[in-house]
Image: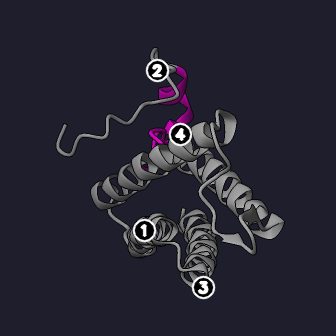
Amino acid sequence: MRWRKLFISFLLSLTVVINTVALGFAAANEEQYDVIVASLQLFFSLYVFLLSARSVRQSTADEHANSILHVTGLTTVAFVLLGSIAILPNKPPPVATSGVGRSEPVLIYLWYTLVGLYTILCVLTFTTPLGPPLYFPPKNIYSEKTVDSITNKDEENVCGLIGA
């Protein structure tokens, strides 16, 4: 589980880098609207990155589940919003321009890379388990005769409630 959270943190660090580059281009062009959009995207990606980096060291089920659910919600919002802008644009994506009003192809590729990263992150966080598997093999603690007499062969034989 820790490796998956490290990978999610690594991908989110790439989003921070991409948004920092976009903010640099926006500041170089002195476009106030582009600077505002790029800085909001940078703060958002930095916040999500810090949440995911904090979750790497969390080992209890409650803390892990809360962090993963929070990161899942935020990456889903980013994926839906950026994906909808990519699919249904009424003007070019909100990336800084260079020169005489034309978009730099590199910046557009970086923006689409950001959309792809949030898509991958959304899928990864949705598929991250929120706790340990709810199955313990009865043959590890009971005799073979007792295991053969068990009528409930359910694979989820652990309730997850403490003291139940």
Report the Cα–Cα distance between label 2 and label 3: 71 Å
Instruction: Decide which of 116, 122 is in the foreground and name it.
Output: 116
Residue located at (42% from left, 48% from top) = 130
- Badge 4 amino acid: Val
Task: Read off the residue under disc 2.
Answer: 150
- Badge 1 amino acid: Ile
What span is colored magenta in the figure?
A: 131-148
Q: Nearer the viewer, mark 3 or mark 4?
A: 3
Report the Cα–Cα distance between label 3 and label 4: 29 Å
Q: Is residue 140 visible?
A: no
Task: Read off the residue under disc 1.
Answer: 36
Residue located at (42% from left, 31% from top) = 157
Instruction: Decide which of 52, 102 is in the foreground and name it.
Output: 102
Q: Position of residue 72 (x, y in %)?
A: 45, 49
Q: Residues within 10 Å of mark 4 (few under 14, many from 20)?
A: some
Earlier residue among tags 2 and 3: 3
Report the Cα–Cα distance between label 4 and label 1: 20 Å
Residue located at (55% from left, 77% from top) = 23
Residue 137: in magenta span: yes
Q: Is residue 8 left or right of residue 99?
A: left
